[in-house]
Image: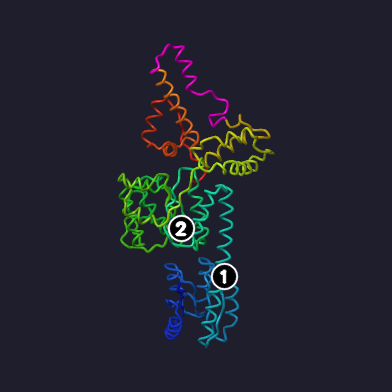
């Protein structure tokens, strides 16, 4: 890939000379006349290297260097200085300059200094990338497991991370989609830029446009000041759109336009603003099924679907259950400051046999609660929340009661089904700490249906937020 170099000098002749030299050498060149313009150009599109004069009117090279390194600490800057300004060059090196050249300079000196600076950056990036791969793989292993199924996910993360592909992360609630998104960001060339996660199901439809694209002052009631949207805030980095299927068709159309044109316009604004955010989108339902059902735009699906990673549910990778449980127990042990020895064989068997509809999030909450309840070792009685530790089957209880009341088979079956349904809904609400939106996702029904079930079954619930990321 052609390196982009920004030449900053107040003398037109030097800008022309350096631009010609560098373009002939195969570099892409842009220019600025002073430090302020250099800062503005870099903010819009960071170059790979800056070649900048020390003495310029307005914002000089030293001030511009200091501000550039604050916003772009790994950007190599080579300073140009006259013979009588060597102390300035030394000070520039203290501020983070990669090198300095004395005027008048030879063409070969310039090219050699640039080549060396870019090679150093490439080497540091490679080392940083390898370290990020190692750290993210270890981190993912601790919170997602080490099974063959998860290893496939790790390989896909490594394959796509260093690209600019838009990625769809497909998986049930609680499987760890945001963790995978963060791992992709950490292994990418954007790792030193922002990572923003947007819950597309949390913001009301009337506000999601403002959240994504920003708004100007006075754009709507309550817009007392201009606000940059998440696309602007994540520019240069990664924007993670969680539960993207919750976006309305109207917002989907605007999102598609932004992805195609790489420009946004704030609500109430007229100016188009260039943005450069990599998009990672997550869904806990089959996006293709949503397209076929008319709930998700087909053109947006194809624009997002440059690469797909499917994260398997915990029940399909049981090898990970005890590995993760022990890891979560270690975290709980530190949090609670309790000398918990471990998980008994009987309790481990219950963990292995459970269906885990809430996936890794459910497992973490179950272990955390069991650690609180136990004295030294987690036993089956500390896992009663799973619903299968010493509790009689609801259907049997309903049968005994039905016979005593003289009910018919049809009536007993109806009551048994209602009892089971109540237990399932209550359990889903427990797993999501009363969050009805999450519970509805878990049960594969819409929130309106869940509210009807709660009222009809006489269930009391409370709103709360889960503490484990998607």
Instruction: Name the residue: 55% across, 74% down.
Output: 119
Tag in front: 2 or 1? 1
Q: Which residue is disc 1 drawn over? A: 123
| Residue nearest the observer in this picture, 268 or 122 | 122
The picture places residue 50, in percent across and down from the top left corner, at 49, 75
If you read the primary sequence from the N terminus, does the residue marked by circle 2 or circle 1 appear first?
1
The number of numbered badges drawn on the structure is 2
Whether 390 is among the magenta residues is yes
The x, y position of residue 392, in whole percent, is 53, 23
422 is within the stretch colored magenta = no
Q: Residue at x 32, y 54 (%)?
A: 299
Secondary element type, mark 2: strand
Q: Residues within 10 Å of mark 1 (few under 14, many from 20)?
A: few
| Image position of 154 (left or right of 223) | right
> How far, Cα to Cα, is label 2 from label 1?
23 Å
What span is in magenta?
384-410
Q: Quadrant of the N terminus?
A: bottom left
- The image's mark for residue 238 is 2
Asked whether the residues under the numbered discs 2 and 1 touch, taking CB atoms below 8 Å apart as contact, a structural biologist would say no
> Measured along the vertical axis of the image, is residue 431 above or below residue 206?
above
Estimate the x, y position of residue 96 in percent, counting from the top left. 57, 72
Give residue 448's quadrant in the image.
top left
């Amino acid at each position: 890939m052609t390196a982009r170099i920004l030449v900053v000098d107040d003398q037109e002749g030097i800008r022309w000379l350096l631009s010609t030299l560098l373009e002939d050498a195969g570099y892409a060149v842009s220019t600025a006349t002073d430090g302020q313009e250099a800062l503005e150009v870099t903010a819009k599109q960071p170059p790979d290297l800056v070649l900048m004069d020390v003495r310029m009117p307005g914002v000089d090279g030293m001030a511009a260097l200091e501000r550039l390194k604050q916003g772009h600490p790994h950007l190599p800057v080579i300073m140009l200085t006259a013979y009588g300004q060597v102390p300035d060059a030394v000070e520039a090196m203290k501020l983070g300059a990669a090198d300095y050249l004395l005027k008048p300079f030879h063409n070969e000196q310039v090219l050699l200094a640039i080549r060396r600076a870019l090679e150093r950056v490439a080497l540091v990036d490679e080392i940083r990338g390898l370290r990020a791969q190692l750290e993210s793989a270890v981190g993912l292993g601790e919170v997602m497991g080490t099974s063959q199924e998860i290893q496939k996910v790790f390989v896909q993360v490594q394959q796509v991370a260093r690209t600019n592909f838009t990625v769809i992360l497909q998986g049930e609630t609680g499987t760890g989609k945001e963790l995978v998104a963060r791992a992709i960001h950490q292994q990418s060339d954007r790792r030193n830029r922002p990572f923003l996660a947007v819950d597309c199901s949390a913001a009301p439809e009337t506000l999601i446009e403002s959240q994504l694209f920003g708004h100007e002052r006075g754009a709507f009631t309550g817009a007392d000041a201009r606000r940059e949207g998440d696309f602007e805030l994540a520019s240069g980095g990664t924007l993670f759109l969680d539960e993207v299927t919750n976006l309305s068709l109207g917002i989907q159309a605007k999102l598609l336009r932004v992805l195609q044109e790489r420009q946004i316009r704030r609500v109430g604004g007229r100016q188009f603003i260039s943005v450069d955010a990599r998009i990672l989108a997550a869904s806990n339902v089959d996006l293709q099924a949503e397209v076929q059902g008319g709930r998700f735009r087909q053109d947006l699906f194809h624009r997002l679907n440059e690469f797909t990673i499917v994260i398997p549910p915990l029940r399909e990778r049981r090898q990970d259950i005890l590995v993760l449980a022990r890891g979560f127990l270690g975290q709980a042990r530190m949090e609670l400051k309790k000398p918990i020895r471990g998980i008994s064989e009987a309790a481990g068997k219950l963990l292995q046999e459970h269906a885990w509809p809430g996936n890794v999030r459910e497992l973490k909450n179950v272990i955390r609660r069991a650690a609180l309840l136990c004295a030294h070792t987690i036993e089956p009685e500390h896992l009663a929340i799973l619903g299968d530790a010493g509790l009689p089957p609801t259907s049997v209880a309903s049968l005994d009661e039905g016979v005593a009341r003289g009910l018919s088979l049809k009536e007993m079956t109806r009551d048994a089904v209602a009892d089971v349904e109540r237990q399932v809904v209550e359990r889903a609400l427990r797993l999501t700490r009363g969050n009805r939106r999450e519970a509805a996702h878990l049960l594969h029904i819409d929130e309106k249906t869940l509210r009807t079930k709660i009222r009809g079954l006489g269930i009391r619930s409370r709103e709360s937020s889960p503490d484990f990321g998607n």
